[in-house]
Image (cartoon, rainbow, N blue to C red):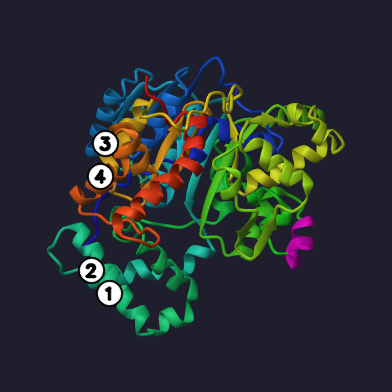
Amino acid sequence: MSIVHAKDTPYTWGFYDELNPIFLNYVCALNGHHPVPIKDGFSYCDLGCGFGVTANGLAQLFPQGKFTGIDFNEDHIATATELAKDCGSTNIEFMTLDVNHITDAELPQYDFIILHGVLSWVDPGTRENIRQFVADHIKDDGIVYVSYNSLPGWAALAPLRDVVLTHTAGMTTDYLMKTQAGLDYLDFMATNNAAFFVDNPPAREFLAEIKTRDIEYVAHELLIEFTKAYYFHQVAAEYRSAGLSYSGNADLYLNFIDLAVPAEFREILLKATSRFEFESRGDFIRNQRFRKDVYKNSRKTMSEEEQLETLSHIVFGTSCMVPEFQTSVAFGDVELKYAGDVFTGLIEVLSTTPKCAAELVQMDQFKAYGLDLVIDALKFLSAGGQVVPMRENANGRTDLDIDADRYSIPASFNVQLLKRRLLQQDALGLIAPKAGVGISVSMADALFALCLVEANKDEVPNWVFQRLLEARQELQFEGGTETEAIAAAVEKFRATRLPKFLELGILEPAE
Ligand SMILES: C[S@@+](CC[C@H](N)C(=O)[O-])C[C@H]1O[C@@H](n2cnc3c(N)ncnc32)[C@H](O)[C@@H]1O
C-alpha cells in the first residue's frame, strides 16, 4: 500500500506569521470585528501543530501568552518540545494527543485556536471532532484560524494524487522515495504532454510549484492517507454551527473588492448580499485552491467609529528597506501599483520607523491627507505583504551600528532555528523580537547573518565560503570568482539587509 499515515509522517519546518495574534487581530479589525486584547496575556492553541515551529516562535515573541501545541505524531511533539526547551521557553507546552480522543485531556478554553493545514488532511469523523473541539474550547470573542485546500481550484489538482498512488502502489521503498518517484512520473507526463496536463494548465503549474517545495510537504499533499478539498460555504457552515462568525481572509488582499477579483467582476462582488456570497463568487472567479479563513466567536461587530479608532492605532512597519520595496504587486490577474506621494511617503517613513495612522497624520507630510486616507493607504500597503502590523511598541531604528566587528542573535528561537535548519531549506522563518512578527529570510541572508555572529568583520566572506563548503552547498552569486562574489554579496547584505535585521532585533551588535 503506498498511502502514508499522518501519524508517522514528519511535516516541514515552516513558520507562518499569519498565525501571529497581531496579524489575526488585524484581519478581524479590517473586517469590523473586535481584536482580542493581547497585552496582558492570552491563551493560544495550535491544533495539528506539526513540529511546533510557529508556536515556538510566537511563544518567544509573546511571553505574556500561554501556548499549547497538539499533534498526534509523536515525532512532531518530541521535536517541538525539545525546541521549546532549547529556546528556554516556559510559556509553551506540547501534547501528543489525537483530536479524536481529546476529551480525555482536560483542556481549557483559548483566545486563539489555530487549524493550519489540518482540515483537508483528516477523515470526516476527525473533522467533526475538530469542529466539536473548537466549539467547546474557544472563548467568547476568541479567534479561530482555519486553512484548507479549497474548491473549485483544487478540483483540477486532485487527480494528481490518484495518479501518484497508482504509480507507487507496488513500491516497497520509504515514503520519501515514493514521493520522489511520483513526482518524476508526473514530470514525465507533463513534459510529454499527457492530455491531462494539456487540458489542465493549473495542474502543470502546480507540479512546477511543488517540485520546488520540501519533499515532506509534497508527501503530505500526494500520499497522505486522506485528503479532501472543500468549498468555502461547507467549512463556513460547519464553523457557524460551532457558534463562529466568519471575519475575513488571512490573504489580506482578498478582503478588498478592488484586489480580490479583476475589474470586470467587481460589479458582481459589489452586488453580493452577504460575505458568504462574496467569498463563494470570488473563489470561482479566481479558481481558489487554498483558503486561510479567520473566524470570530462573537456576533458583535464594531461601529464605524470603533473600527476607525482601532485601525488608527495599529502600528505598521516594513519587512524590507526602501530600495528593495516592490512598488508593484500582482495578485493573480490583478496588479496593485503603489504610485503617488502618499504611498511613496509612507513606504519611506515606515521602512525606518514603525508607526500607526494616528501618529502618521500628525506628521506634516501626511496631515493634508487626513486619517481616513492614510488608513486606506496602509490597508493597501499591508495587502501587498511588505508593510506588516507590528507590536504597539515596535520602536524602529535607534542605534543601528552597521559597522560593528561582530553581532549577536538575541532571540534563542532564531539561534535554534539556524542551528537546526541552516542550508536545509530555501528560506527560514525568523522572529523579529522588536517588532513582534516573524519574517521569511532567504537562506543566503540567514547564512550571512550567522557569519556576522561567528566571525570578525574581515573574516565574514571566508567564513561564508567555509560554511558552504562544509555543507556541500552552492549559492548563486552574481559574477567574479566565488570568493569575490561572496565578498560582494556580504557587502550588499550589510548595506541592504543588516539595518533591517538590527531594527527588527534579529541581530544586535555584540557586547
Ligand atoms: C499538513 S500538517 C500541518 C502541520 C502544521 N499545522 C503546519 O502547518 O506546519 C497536519 C498536521 O495535523 C496532524 N494531525 C492529523 N490528524 C490528527 C489528529 N487526529 N490528531 C492530532 N493531530 C493530527 C498531523 O500529524 C500533522 O502534523
Closer to viewer: mark 1 or mark 4? 1
Indicate the amino acid at tag 4: Lys
Q: Which mark is residue 378?
A: none
Q: Earlier in the sequence, mark 4 or mark 2?
A: 4
- Is residue 260 shown in magenta? no
Mark 4 and ligand 1: say if the CB distance to the nearest ligand atom is below 8 Å.
Answer: yes
* Front-most of residues 113 and 455: 455
Q: Earlier in the sequence, mark 1 or mark 4?
A: 4
Mark 1 closeness class: few <14, some 14–19, many ≥20 residues within 10 Å: some
Q: Which mark is residue 419?
A: 3
Quadrant the C terminus occupies: top left
Classified by dominant secondary structure, the portion drawn in magenta counts as helix
Secondary structure at badge 4 equals: helix
| Above/below status of 478 relative to 423 | below
Q: Which residue is denoted by mark 2 in the rendering?
A: 181
**Quarter of the figure with residue 196:** bottom left
Q: Which residue is denoted by mark 4 in the rendering?
A: 7
What residue is at 15 percent from the left and 67 percent from the top? 171
Callouts 1 and 4 close, C-beta under 8 Å = no
Callouts 2 and 1 close, C-beta under 8 Å = yes
Q: Earlier in the sequence, mark 3 or mark 2?
A: 2
Percent position of residue 150, x then y: 51, 57
